[in-house]
């Protein structure tokens, strides 16, 4: 295999990252896509791992300014899946050949430490799948108990590493530092740790997004999810021209576009070469025809097919127009395998750990 990575790839610093994010010339961008694709192939191979996503509850105590299931949104009908229903989804994941099930929810206080632990134990015992949790910020002890019960990975996006912007879009939160501390704690417990940011949040500057990329490298994240910010009309941030959420000044505002998402995905691959990086549903929402494929061809190696039963899926509306909302789990499975094969890649087998970092399974 030829390995001809240009020298600039090894020397990415804040100013070159920012220059790449601002790059608009097609031939230069082709160079970026090629470098990201080459590094992806060398470091994580042609397998595309499928992480089956179950959105287990849309109850949430938080008021994130961008999120459609924020506590203050009274338009949403709330649901909470029963353990048996969640188990049925996990069995489906196994039947489709996925290696991982991801349990995601709002910050739902009805999910007690023991309720989640028991669920994790049952899924691990019955399916042997890798288990990823994405249940938000919890007391440190919960993460320990869940790891003990058999959870392998934890996803907690920082959303932006800019402390001022973080505070603005997360009213009433303790701030960015506690979230970074949780990511370090999770690492210490032996989880594979994932984080990431949204692209094009009002107030997000190019300088800020390039610092996010540097932080991915510094934290040595195992998994990194980056997707476009999509305004939700029933949220404060989704109100056009809201005075509390100004754009970054002086032409510095990052647009929440498809093109900016590809650049961020590609640069993420270059700063964290062996990370698992999804081609996100938010990206597929901006381009239903080709978004997933282009993400996979420009640095990503993961997809997250939705397993949530259709009746609940429509209620997990963190942003509007979400791709796959009217599909069934089986339709998503078929659709994604077809898309993976159409671009000459192969559906992954096994849990799809970060290469060389296979953790102890309990
Ligand atoms: N647009 C795009 N992504 C969003 N998320 C939440 N709200 C939105 C939105 N309006 C993302 C956040 C969160 C993940 C589950 O979904 O990054 O961590
Ligand atoms: Fe609940 Fe954001 S408001 S996850």
Image (cartoon, grey):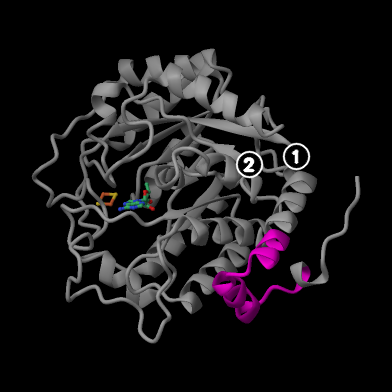
In this view, the residue in front, 10 or 105, is: 10
Contact (Cβ within 8 Å) of mark 1 with mark 2: yes
**Residue 359 in the image: x percent, y percent?**
66, 39
- Picture layout, residue 62 above or below residue 90: below
Q: Is residue 29 magenta?
A: yes
Number of other residues with Cα within 10 Å of mark 1, as a class: few under 14, some 14 to 19, many 20 or more: some
Part of the protein shown in magenta: 10-32
Q: Is residue 230 magenta?
A: no
Give me the residue at 69% from left, 73% from top.
Answer: 12
In this view, the residue in front, 324 or 175, is: 324
- Picture layout, residue 171 above or below residue 304: below
**Residue 204 in the image: x percent, y percent?**
39, 72
The residue labelled by disc 1 is 45
**Residue 79 in the image: x percent, y percent?**
19, 30
**Residue 6 in the image: x percent, y percent?**
82, 66
- Locate residue 36 relative to residue 333 in the image: left or right: right
């Amino acid at each position: 295999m030829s390995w001809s990575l240009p020298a600039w790839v090894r020397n990415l610093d804040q100013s070159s990252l920012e220059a790449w994010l601002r790059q608009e010339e097609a031939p230069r961008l082709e160079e970026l896509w090629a470098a990201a694709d080459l590094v992806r192939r060398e470091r994580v191979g042609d397998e595309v791992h499928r992480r089956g996503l179950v959105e287990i509850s849309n109850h949430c105590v938080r008021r994130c300014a961008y999120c459609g299931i924020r506590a203050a949104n009274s338009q949403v009908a709330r649901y909470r899946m029963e353990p048996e229903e969640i188990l049925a989804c996990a069995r489906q994941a196994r039947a489709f050949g996925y290696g991982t099930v991801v349990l995601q929810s709002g910050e739902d206080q009805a999910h007690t430490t023991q309720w989640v632990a028991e669920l994790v134990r049952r899924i691990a015992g019955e399916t042997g799948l890798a288990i990823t949790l994405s249940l938000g910020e919890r007391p440190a002890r919960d993460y320990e108990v869940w790891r003990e019960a058999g959870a392998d990975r934890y996803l907690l996006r920082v959303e932006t590493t800019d402390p001022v912007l973080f505070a603005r879009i997360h009213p009433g939160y303790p701030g960015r530092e506690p979230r970074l501390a949780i990511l370090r704690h999770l690492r210490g417990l032996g989880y594979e740790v994932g984080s990431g940011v949204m692209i094009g949040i009002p107030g997000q500057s190019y300088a800020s997004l390039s610092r996010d990329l540097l932080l991915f490298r510094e934290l040595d994240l195992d998994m990194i999810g980056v997707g476009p910010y999509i305004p939700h009309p029933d949220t404060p941030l989704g109100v056009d021209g809201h005075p509390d959420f100004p754009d970054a000044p002086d032409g510095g505002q990052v647009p929440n576009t498809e093109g900016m998402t590809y650049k961020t995905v590609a640069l993420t691959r270059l700063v964290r070469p062996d990370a698992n990086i999804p081609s996100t549903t938010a990206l597929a929402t901006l381009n239903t025809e080709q978004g997933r494929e282009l993400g996979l061809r420009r640095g990503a190696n993961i997809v997250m097919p939705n397993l949530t039963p259709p009746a609940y899926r429509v209620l997990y509306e963190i942003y509007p127009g979400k791709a796959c909302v009217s599909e069934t789990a089986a339709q998503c499975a078929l659709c994604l395998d077809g898309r993976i094969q159409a671009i000459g890649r192969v559906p992954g087998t096994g849990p799809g750990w970060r290469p060389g970092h296979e953790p102890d399974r309990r």
